[in-house]
Each structure stands twice: as C-alpha cells, then as structure tokens.
Amino acid sequence: MDGTEGVVGMGWMAKMGVAGLVAWGSLAGAVAAEPVFKVPALEQPAGVPLEFVRTKSMEAGLAVRPVAIDLGEWTGLKSAPEMPVQIIGASRAVQQARSSAQTAQLLQWQTSAKGGAVAALSLRSGGAEALRLGLLVEQLPGSAMLRLYTEHQPAAVFEIAGQRVMQILQANRDAGDDSEAGRTWWAPSSSGEQVTLEIELPPGTAPEQLKVSLPQLMHIYQNLSLPLDRLEAGEEQADSKAMPVGNPVECHLDVNCYSQATTERKGVARMAYVTQRFADGSYYYGLCTGSLLNDAQGSKTPYFLTAAHCMSTQTLASALETDWFYTSTRCASNSLSPSSVNLRNGAQLLYTSANPDVTLLKLNDAPPAGAVFLGWDSSIVPDNSVVVGVHHPSGGLQKISFGAMSSRYDCSLDSKNVFCSFAPSTGNYYYVRWSMGLTQQGSSGSPLFHNGAVTGVLTGASEASCRANGAGAYSFYPSLNSVMPALRKWLVDAGGTQTPVAGRMPVYRFYNTQNGTHFFTASAQERDAVIQGNPVYQYENIGFYASTQTAAAPQAVYRFYNTTTGSHFFTINPEERAFVIATYPQFNVEGTAWYARQAAGEGSVPMYRFYNTLTGAHFYTTNPVERDFVVATYPQFLFEGVAYYVWGSQ
C-alpha cells in the first residue's frame, strides 16, 4: 500500500497513499466517543397498501386523440459526460412546448365523460428505449388528473392528481429550490420511444387555470427493463444506447448463483434519477444503488441509504425511481425476474454529506412486500474481516462480491477523483479487497455487509478488471460508524427523540365530481371500495399523513357525512363536533377519522381549511400553493385558517 496508485473507479479516480491531502471534515474525533448501535433486519409484510392503484377509468380505456409532437431520430449525445455515476440518458428540448403559452395552444380540449375538459399530447423521440417527461409547472389545479400511457401499452396507465404533483414540487421549494429544476415534475419512466400525457380538468375548472409546459424530455438510450448482451471486448461503441445493461464485465457474480446474502439482497435496490440541471439547461439520467434500512423501533419507515455523489439535493430525490428484486430469473440467466417492482414516487432528503460520501433518504413509496429493512451495525469492522457487497453494476441485474476489509483510510473527493491516505486507527473509509467479483459504475451507494449487517456505503473503486476473476480489485466504503452521529437521529432516536414517535399513516384524497367536494380516508380498504364502487369519486392519491397513535397526536379528528349534500366534514374541535351533532341532524357522525396535532411540532405542517359560502361544504389542503390558488381563483371559498397540524410525509 505504499506509494501512489491511480485507477479508474465508478467515475472516480481512486488514489491511495497520497500525502498532504486536504481533509474533508473527518469525524474521527467524534467516532471514538460515539456508542455502537446494532439493529436487526425486518421484512416488509404482504398487504401493505400502495398509493398508486388501478382505477375503473383506466380499465375502461382512454379515447382522447392526442396532439402529436415528433422530435425525430436521436442525434444527440453519443457518449456519457464525465460524471461520478453511470449515465444512460440525456434531456432533449421540446421546442414546440417550451412555454406555457405554446403548450396551451397545443392542447385541444374536449369535454370529458365527467363533464370537465380533457386534452393530451403525444411525444416521440426516435430510438429511445424509455422516456421521462419534464413538466414545468406554473399553475396546476389540485383536482386535475395527469395520466401517462404508451401506444404499445395503452392499458398500462399511470395516474396522478395535480395536488400530488404539487406536493412533490413543494418539497423542492421547502428545501430552497425555486429554480426551473425545482419546479419541474419528472413523470415516471415509460418504455419505448413514445409516450402520451393526458390532462383532465374537473367540471368548473377552466383550461386557462392550467399553466404548464413541456420544455424537455429525458431520452433514455439504454433498455432499463431487459438486460442487454455484453459487448465484445474492444468493440467500438457507435451509439451509447448500445451500452450493455446487465453483464458489462464477465467476472460480475449473479446473486442467484450463490447461497450467501439471500436476505440482504432483498433490501438492495437499483436507483434511476434525473441529475442536476447544468448551465446549458440540460439534464442527464443516472443510475446508482441504495439500500433500505431498519430503525431501532422497527417502525418500517422506508429509510434509504446511498452515496452523496449519487444524490445530494431534495430536487434530485424528488425524481428518484427505485427497482426492487431486480435480479435474474435463475443463476446466470440474464433475464429479468418477473418479481421486479418499480417504485416511482421519489423520496425525501434527510441527510447528505460530501465526505464521508453518504446520503440518507426516506422513500415516499411503501417498499413492496418481501423487501427487507436491512439490519446494520455501526461498530468498526476489524481488519481482515470477511465482507460482502450487493450492488447493480452499470445498472444491471443484481450482483454480489466477496472480499475482506483490509484496512482503514481517510479519503477526500472532488468532481473526478477520490484521494485516500492510510489511516489505520482513525480512517472513515474501509479499503476492501475483492477475492471474487468487483464493483463498477452503477454500484455507487451500495451497501457493504459484515456478518449480514450493513456497515458501509460504496464511494469508489479500482478499474473494472477480470484478472484472476476480479481478485485484486478494490473499493472504498465510508464506514457507517463515521456518519452515525448524524444518522442516529432517524435510525436510533426516532426523529430526534429518545422515545418512539407515533406511526404515521397515509390519508387518501378523493374529488367528488358530482358536487365538487373532497373526501378523505385513512383506510386503504375504504379507498379501494370507493374506487371500485363509486365512479363519482376521482382518486387523487395521498393527500397527507396523519398519526396512528394518540401519543404524538392526542387529538382525534372526527368525520361527519352530510346526508343532504353527500359531502363530508372533518373537525378536530370537540366543541364544534358537539355543536354539529346538536344543530344539524343531516350530519351523521362517523367516528374518529385519524389523529392530528392542535399545535405545530414534530415536523408537522398546517392543514388549511376553507368554507364554500355557496354550498356550505368545506375544503382542506396542506399545500400552500393550492391554498393560494383557491384564494386567488374561487371567491366563494372563505379561508378559515389552520384547522390543525398533520405531516407531509411518513
């Protein structure tokens, strides 16, 4: 380990034994005083409700004729820019829809089956393996419905409400990003070179109230659904879309060929996301790896660990998609398992550090059944200990690597390099030598396992080489120990307290297209029954999160049903509840809907309440943008202030 050795890693140059390096905030002093924590693994049970569910309107099919925008064949990027992550796509300008005024002229509104208005745009980027649309939002009614589907799979429709899109963009704004990037919602990926965006507005909402544009789309030039064959060694790459996804290096080891880490692999997912916006206005599409972590309370909160050089801002996290059980069907088959599950609802950024190179997220989606909240161990891994890596090199099918933690290093990073120097007693990074298998671009952010527990996060590695079946290759992992002083707030102390916080459950939102009111339920069973049995109600995804326990949110929110108007009323005030029961016999009390807080605290957000002076119904929203839209657009809605406090995420 003497001298200097420079090797190409996962977009990083790993240099070892270099003297006089600039330190990037070593936590060595804090590490020594930190207690050691160990948390076991926990499997996600079956029956956990998902946010995006199939609706009858999707099953019936969509008959709107879209306006077609054909960008022609791809003549753009032929090789990925030099970045520390795997790049497999680039943005492409849509000149025809670059402003909200141009987009408004393109949209040809028709009367919808529900009496509102509906229009659609179909976009094609020739040669794309997949697309993601970048919708720049200036003004979007909360009850607008956005749908995405393709010509080759018209029944596979993704549907999301405008209020849910605004929630995602509000997270960017709350994190300080009000730029064009922060105001862009990246639609989920769709396979093929064509995708249709359909927008439906409810009755009473004029098309002029919608102000959106589609200035660009993401042209993904690698097939993310089916692994491609390996390129022959030395073959010149004529087009980047031919880059392999799956087995770019022969000595990568298919997890299904080994009996080790059968539980651990279920907590490791492939990441796909839109990168930051560059100075010229362009974006790229990146791949990394991350892992689902358990917390000390076993709360099933979807904490997700990865590298900061993969994801370091809320805006990046909002465009995250994760692929679970992204493995082969059997040993070395190179065919994608039908059990693979794609989650596409982004994440909340909790913590990020440039060095040690670690980011902690909280997924907005519930992990699929069978996924494992991984156990972890913050103690220092002894030298020469056996370790295992599970990862997605080049974004391909899940692979496994076997080696030993040789020693500890201090490392610093810049945009191209990882500089590491030997620090056997205080180093924040593990230097891992592989005996079988190795890591590569796309593996970044993947977990290092010791005795079945996560103990590190991948930053960089040596050049991918199959000499001696990968033996001699090495990787650098920031130790979990080095960032535990920061991460224990979530993983140990339950959000910063020494006692567990109350669990949070999603509250689902519906729009009644018949009377213009909204309905909320915390029951997934009731949600699904309404979707299947009452077409008058338009499902609008998750509206907010409430408490499942009275400890953190001691006040019950009561639900009433108005038998005269068919609308629902919600109140946290016991006196108001008693007044309604005594005064309005047409209001049937339906019990406690959920629990909330009467005062701010524990990361809660205000629930704003409006009174419709024309209908006598109430409207509720946690989104400040939707609040302001209602105030500016509907004079009949009297703003009544903050009703109580709930949460914007789990």
Image: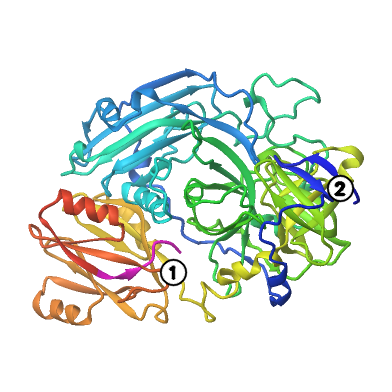
Kind of residue at badge 1: Arg
Marks 2 and 1, how far apart at CA: 43 Å
* Residue furthest out toward the front: 20
Q: Quadrant of residue 520?
A: bottom left
Residue depicted at x 48% and y 23%: 125
Of callouts 2 and 1, the N-terminal one: 2
Horizontal side of residue 349 vs 405, given as left or right: left
Q: Is residue 465 placed above or below 426 in the rendered structure?
A: above
Q: Is residue 447 placed above or below 645 in the rendered structure?
A: above
Q: Dot 2 surroundings within 10 Å: few (below 14), some, or many (20 or more)?
A: many
Residue depicted at x 38% and y 52%: 173
Residue 259 seen from this side: no
Numbered circle sitting on residue 476: none
Horizontal side of residue 541 vs 452, given as left or right: left
Relative image position of residue 313 (x, y in whole percent):
51, 51
Magenta stretch containing residue 562, yes or no? no
Residue depicted at x 54% and y 61%: 302
Residue 439 seen from this side: yes
Relative image position of residue 568 (x, y in whole percent):
21, 64
Q: Secondary structure at mark 1?
A: strand
Front position in the image: 622 or 429: 429
Q: Secondary structure at mark 2?
A: strand
Numbered circle sitting on residue 436: 2
Point out the stretch of residues depicted in magenta: 643-650
Relative image position of residue 224 (x, y in whole percent):
60, 36
Horizontal side of residue 6 vs 278, given as left or right: right
Kind of residue at badge 2: Met
Horizontal side of residue 138 vs 640, given as left or right: right
Residue depicted at x 62% and y 31%: 81
Q: Are marks 2 and 1 in contact (CB under 8 Å)?
A: no
Disc 1 designates what residue? 504
Q: Quadrant of residue 371?
A: bottom right
